[in-house]
Image (cartoon, coloured by chain):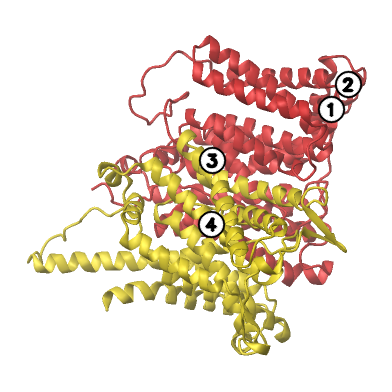
Amino acid sequence: MNLLRGKLMPPLLAIVFSALLCSVALVISGSNPGTALSAMVSQVGHGTTAVDIVNSASVYYLAGLAVAIGFKMNLFNIGVEGQFRVAAVTAAVVGGALRLPPVLDAIVILLVAVLTGALYAAIPAVLKVTRGVNEVISTIMLNAIAMGIVAYMIRPDVFGVLHGNNISTAEIPTAGQVPGISFGSGGTVFGLVILAAAIGVGYWVMMNRSRFGFELRASGESPTAATAGGVNAKKMVLTAMLLSGGIAGLVAMPELLGRDHSYGIISPAGYGFTGIAVALLGRNHPGGVAFGALLWAFLDKSALALDNVGVPKEIVTIMQGTIVLSVVVAYEIVRRVELAAEQRRVGRELGNTGGTPPQPAVASAGGES
Amino acid sequence: MTTMTSNPAAAPLTVAVPPRRRKLPGWASGMIWVALAVAVLTTASYLTGVPQLTSSGTTQTAVVLALPILLAGLGGLWSERAGVVNIGLEGMMIFGTWGAAYGGYYWGPWAGLACAAAFGALGGLVHAIATVTFGVNHIVSGVAMNLLGAGIAKYLSTLIFEPLSHNPRSSPTVPKFDTYSASGLSDWLQQLEQQQRVGISDVAGLLRGIVTGVSPMTMVTIALVPITFLVLWRTRFGLRLRSCGENPVAAESLGVNVYLHKYVAVIASGALAGMAGAALVLNPGQSGYLEGQTNGRGYIGLAAMIFGNWRPGGLLGGAALFGYSDGLQLSSGGKTVLALIYGAVLLLAVLVIVQLVRRKWLAASVGFVAAGGLYAVYWSVDSLPTEFTPYLPHFVTLIVLTVASQRLRPPAADGFIYRRGQGD
């Protein structure tokens, strides 16, 4: 019960706090927070919004898991954005050229995406283990360079095809497409939503039931203890980064194989950064990340309704930003409160009621699993 | 942040740095690097026949583009010297761009600059509350700051700028600073540059770019470099601030208020990042605030600071490097960038020779292979694809960090979460 409270309280506190903050911002700018909220909630029932939320959430979920693997060992893969874009454009180019039987075709495209993502993530990983380059800076630089790679790959004289005013890769044939689950007028859920869920389960099993997962978590909680226990730190950085990049490679796949069938300059971007927020929100736990992804998708999709009631929909980005910041602060506060409660409990049990309470060293690695 | 090995200029609080060969003082090695850079550029410009490498136009653009990076880097320097990693520079810069446009539109450029600094400082305050008071992981908080900065600027821009500019993504045109030129000197240098004499004209071009079209923004920014150095390295306050970044437990045992110093440092860092945003908005080439305008410059500033080994002089060099590569690609494009690659080959050749003399065989062979690869690129293509040239500064950042990062020494407690009374 206590454990559950410690896990659920922080995100709830954070959401309430940021909702309050946004209400204040709305009141100052002369709008009614109540109407804004009810417009957002009732939007879920309209048209394809509910299905859109699930679809977006699957994409955010993959991005969040990719980031979470790195976060688990204090490795900050900010480069999910670049990894997923390079993987998407490569997979789209390969998919447009391949002519394989159904199912096999889609599998090959997915594999290409995973490999490309991992390969692009290998650059910062290798730079980190051989030259000690900070992965945050190098992945951010590679994110920018990825935009150049996408622009180059879809140039008409390289791999691109011109459709009217719009340049994109060649269309992926039906064999490579993944059919969705149709809800009639309610929209179509991407088939790869199932893949996203499966990867979430795989992530949980790997983290909690495998030796690799244990070593990964150990490296994150205490690098020195992990090294003393025989964990090769460099190998862990490489593997974690490659895994993270591999999952990042899949981020664009639900949309590419389920809806767009080609990748262009106007294809959606920014999922990598959403992934960071979602992973922070979900505390790197597969269930938590799923919740974060759904919340994020809800905020994004139902924000469209805000324009109808005269509220700038950018208020949602403020809400998302404050949620992330307040959730990390809230986790920290709850952790301290629990630590203090624990100390008091230990003090009581030892009969050390008078005098100063015992002061155990505060763990500097602020993580819990 | 990076692996630490040796330390070229020992900060006063580190213990027992093994004695090294007597090194040149900082200003002398700086002069040598400047001379080397000018020599390489001049030679490359002469051998490839691309005068833009050293033209005054390129330098002028470079100076303007280096300003935001320099200011962001100074921001990073202040906070990291106090032990707080500030990945949130980008978000604070975005705050700054909005503040500069708002203040500048209503009350003129100086007010814009002040508004930008105030907005950035607010961002810094939030980061300080999260990292210092609540002990949140610095990078996590910084990433959240970046999300928040982008979100709030977007919201405020829709709310306040859209009725004025009819575009939610940009502000109305903001008045700019007047620019000044050292007229006599500038004209004389122009004559020299136009004579197209090898060496002299190149140096004249580089210098003329620096003394022509200088805005107060440039002067303020350049002045902030020695000011930062004096405050952080020559005052009691600076010593205390840096001691919080090296060993906060020891600092507190000597009666330094660690939290207060960290707060001041991070807020100053935010103000400097905000001014970096102002440098973008009040730049003569821009009309005003534009969504996505910062385009990762906060991170490049951080990279410039790492390149400069957490010291103001080195940071100046890093900012000049990134500003130059950005200015070069903007003012002339693919062919000139190729000429710069040629320059890099020359520079690598010099480094290989140095490593050979020092009998560092591995470093020399790696440098040799890299030089060969770059030369192959130069030789095989006529012009780089235009899709890649905008990312030249990012490539340069990556390469520079790869080459440089092992000889660097960050503040010892950089990025560690410190709680009051931790050392008891």
**Furthest residue in direction front, as rendered:** A101
Which amino acid type corresponds to the residue marked 2 in the rendered image? Glu
- What is the distance, in whole Å, between disc 1 and disc 2 at their CAs? 8 Å
Do the numbered discs 4 and 3 sit on residues whose CB atoms are within 8 Å? no
- Residue displayed at 68% across by 44% down: B68
Which amino acid type corresponds to the residue marked 4 in the rendered image? Val
Judging from the image, mark 3 belongs to the subunit labelled B
Which amino acid type corresponds to the residue marked 3 in the rendered image? Leu
> Does dot 3 land on a helix, a strand or a loop?
helix
Chain with yellow colouring: A
Judging from the image, mark 1 belongs to the subunit labelled B
Do the numbered discs 1 and 2 sit on residues whose CB atoms are within 8 Å? yes
Of the numbered discs 1 and 4, the one sitting upstream in the chain is: 1
Residue B11, x across and y down, in percent: 43, 29
User: Which mark is nearer the camera, 2 or 4?
Assistant: 4
Badge 1 and badge 4 in a common chain: yes
Residue B46, x across and y down, in percent: 82, 18
Q: Can you identify the residue that label 1 sits on?
A: B55
Which amino acid type corresponds to the residue marked 1 in the rendered image? Ser
User: Which mark is nearer the camera, 1 or 3?
Assistant: 1
Quadrant for residue A162, please give it: bottom right
User: Which mark is nearer the camera, 4 or 3?
Assistant: 4
> Does dot 2 land on a helix, a strand or a loop?
helix
Q: Is residue A314 left or right of residue B57?
A: left
Q: Can you identify the residue that label 3 sits on?
A: B77
Of the numbered discs 1 and 3, the one sitting upstream in the chain is: 1
**Furthest residue in direction top, as rendered:** B357
